[in-house]
Amino acid sequence: MRKVQNFNAGWVFSEGFDDAATNTLRDGESVRLPHTAVELPFNYFDEKRYQRAFTYQKVFASEPDFAGKRVTLVFDAAMADSVVFLNGTEIAAHKDGYTPFEVEIGPHLKDGDNLLTVKIDGSENPDIPPFGNVIDYLTFAGIYRDVWLKITTPVAIDNVKIETPDALADAKSVTADVFLTDETTGRLSATLSDAEGSVIATTEASVSGRQARLELSGLKGLRLWDIDDPALYTLTVTLETEAGTDDFANRFGFRTASFASDGFRLNGRLLKLRGLNRHQSWPHLGYAMGRRGQEKDADILKFELACNIARTSHYPQSKYFLDRCDEIGLLVFEEIPGWQHIGGDAWKRESVENVRRMITRDWNHPSIIIWGVRINESADDHDFYAETNRVARELDATRQTGGVRCIENSEMLEDVYTMNDFVLGDEEQPGRNHARICTRDQRQVTGLSKTVPYMITEYNGHMYPTKRFDQESRQAEHVTRHLQMLNAVAGDPTIAGSTGWCMFDYNTHSDFGSGDRICYHGVMDMYREPKFAAYAYASQGEPENGVVLQPVTFWARGERNIGGVLPLIILTNCDYIELTVGDSAPKRVEPARSTYPHLPHPPVILDSHNVSAEEFGDWGRQWFDGTLTGYIDGKPARTMKLAGNPVPTTLEIAPDATELRAAEKDCVRVILRALDQCGNIMPFFDEPVALSLDGPGRIVGPEITSFRGGTAGLYIEAGDETGTLTLSVRCAAFADDTIAFTIS
């Protein structure tokens, strides 16, 4: 039977590389993977610090159970241009920084200790996608995903492609194409089981060669994979040969997904796609976040932002993120690495291989509904994109292809015309002579005489960058633009859906962003703390999954021009709200259904049409507390109080979890919030805060930081030992506080 062991511990990291390193262990830092070569500051840094070579080395012993086996190392990803040496011999090279690669080490092992050396080069090599021109994100450097030691029989199962050709039938079937590492003769068997491990069906067949197909049919009583019921099944394939037994298990789901000119259908049911784009980066750690952070992002998108789809902009992302999307029912648009630039012939060949690597890694994920096979926002290139589409369709005929562009009249070689539509806000540019519109007419975009499958893959973003601590009026406009786009897409049956730009702010090159190496394009900040615009999405979720009641205001008389808080947007999924100002009688206000007729849950908007100046008082008069109450089915569902004279009252320490795993580089987010007497974030609280940690772990980032707009973020990383971690937080406005974490 195969053994797959985590190979993340015991690495030695050093800066630079020289040929002598392939035979000699260099002095360096002891590290555990995943690892980023350079932990950058939160902002204001030189990204060239990581654009150079680094060396990772590990000494490991050849084990007795390696004898007669196929022994490989699987790198889930390393950024980038990796070269692998064992005992001084180069045994593999892999240019791409986003897809996995497997290295056979058995023939190069010697008795006793072996020296493994991996050269990583963070330089932006123009022969490797996405490099060759400027790109609006950072790629960082390092072995930033897991590495695995895999021990199998000499001929083993390399991959399994699972398809469900009649998923909607009462009696379902499964086909499994099994790919082997070499020619062999033997017996293949497959066992289908449910999430509880109960066996549903089995089958077997003989194999002669490198590939075979297994089939299961007449499967009744099985559930479909859907966004509200993501039923997963496991197919375990076993290969038996004279050399022994190998098995390979894959999860999958029964579902259909299709784009047409009248929208997107999941399991035959029309579903409007509503989501956001996601980068795979974090403050300080760059790409090197482990399982917990990857899964948390999926949970935030699904449960906090009420999205039903995420786009993996602009590259294949962690298997942990995709696995979690499978588990919770979050759809995925996955695409190859790239940003606007198309390189030369070698670059294009590498990009075509990226299509192949992406699809063969991820073809069993039911969450993935479309393959992005075009470089994001690039120009047309007929031969190149004809080939990427051909390869995708050859590998996986069950999913359609898309090609994200931002130009009109682009050649449509893909199955779905996917467009970054930034027309909202375009009216502000010099020389434009048109009123605000949210979306371009589809036929104007495509240049075609008929409607085609069509999806908007980006909007807003750079058209209106907004910080979480920006002034209230700018944040209100930020919210309005997201609401207008969501409403426009929801009301157009020819648009399958949209993914806004983007989930959270991210570090970028000096050519982009706000001058501090951050693009403030997200509906959340880099620590995933929501801006007001995040609630534009959250409020579209059904109240049984969480009641949303979020006024877009700091509730202050003089924050806005001229004073007051009107017009006041209240993002909610309640039926209506009641507002009380001071001692006045509650005032009922209905959602703005005439302004946002297509949203499942329009916001409530208070303005001169439904609130008089007397109710709020004129400039120069006393400012009062406020109370908002949201009602569902005539009953109070949520109440929020707003302080007219906010003062620092509570220091909230909010970790995502307090139970951590040892020897895994388990990393948990902690958010600090400065709250007023009503429990609301104080939006202009920017005081310094001192952090310290006692126990087997570390704080990722500085130990002295500051609140930004009333919150601060940090990550706690567990060490290799079990025990207790104690985080101490000191800020002059509050009493000192601590929180404990258990590492087991």
Image (spheres, helix red, strand yellow):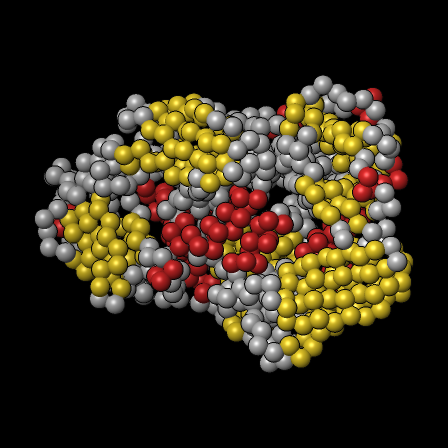
Residue 345 lies, with reference to residue 233, above or below; the image says: above
Residue 67, x across and y down, in percent: 85, 43
Q: Nearer the viewer, residue 273 or 288?
A: 288
Which residue does the image show at 32% across and 41% down from the upper left? Answer: 472
Q: Is residue 502 left or right of residue 400?
A: left
Q: How many marks?
A: 0
Q: Nearer the viewer, residue 594 or 679?
A: 679
The residue nearer to you, when weighing 115 against 274, is: 115
Q: Is residue 686 visible?
A: no
Please provide percent x and percent y for residue 733: 28, 26
Vertical relation: 275 (above or below) 652: below
- Image quadrant of residue 417? bottom right
Residue at horizontal 41%, vertical 29%?
727
Is residue 172 shown left or right of residue 248? left
Q: Residue 4: in sight, yes or no?
A: yes
Position of 617 with respect to 631 (left or right) is left
Residue projecting furthest to the top:
27
Residue 303 in picture, x, y percent from top left: 44, 55
At horizontal 16% and vertical 57% (from top left) the residue drawn is: 587
Q: Position of residue 150 (x, y in %)?
A: 75, 45
Q: Residue at x 41, y 49 (%)?
A: 534
| Frontmost residue, 401 versus 596 | 401
Q: Residue furthest front?
A: 64
